Image: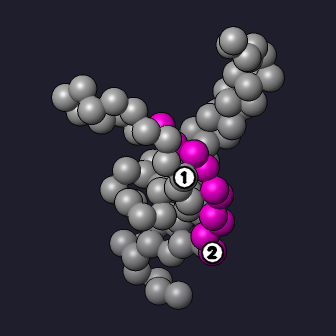
């Protein structure tokens, strides 16, 4: 572990299998793809961050504050608990 505050330290990765809907450009339609999402914690400059990204494309990921990640969890739980399946 480095004492340099500009160096990021990451936790072990948790992998979550997921199905992602991809919308093609220029009328190419849609496709459902199986992806593995990588989840973890990152410590940098004395702050803790939560990161989520497809394992094969980290440029499409999110890096959220712990507070934002907690809000996202609560909002997803509420949304899914109140959702009604469409026919």
Mark 1 Cα shell of 10 Å, populated few (<14), some (14-19), many (≥20): few
| Residue 9 image position (x, y, % from top left) | 51, 75
Q: In the image as oriented, which residue stretches furthest toward the left?
A: 26
- Answer whether residue 19 is magenta in the image: yes
Residue holding disc 2: 12
Foreground residue among 10 and 13: 13
Q: Disc number at residue 34?
A: 1
* Left or right position of 84 against 35: right
Image quadrant in which the C terminus is located:
top right
Q: In the image as oriented, which residue stretches furthest toward the bottom?
A: 1
- Answer whether residue 35 is magenta in the image: no
Disc 2, SS: loop
| Residue 43 image position (x, y, % from top left) | 53, 67
* Left or right position of 13 against 6: right
At a point 33% along the width and 30% down the height, the residue shown is 29
At a point 33% along the width and 56% down the height, the residue shown is 59
User: Magenta region, mostly helix, strand or loop?
Assistant: strand
Q: Disc number at residue 72?
A: none
At a point 40% along the width and 80% down the height, the residue shown is 4
Work out whether residue 48 can be spotted. no
Magenta residues span 12-21
20, above or below 54, in the image:
above
Disc 1, SS: strand
Question: In the rendered image, which quarter is residue 69 located in?
Answer: top right
Q: Earlier in the sequence, mark 1 or mark 2?
A: 2
């Amino acid at each position: 572990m480095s004492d340099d505050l500009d160096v990021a330290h990451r936790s072990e990765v948790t992998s979550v299998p997921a199905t992602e809907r991809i919308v093609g450009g220029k009328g190419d339609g849609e496709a459902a793809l199986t992806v593995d999402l990588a989840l973890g914690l990152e410590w940098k400059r004395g702050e803790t961050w939560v990161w989520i990204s497809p394992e094969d494309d980290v440029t499409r990921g999110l890096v959220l504050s712990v507070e934002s990640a907690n809000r996202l969890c609560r909002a997803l739980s509420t949304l899914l608990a109140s959702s009604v399946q469409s026919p």
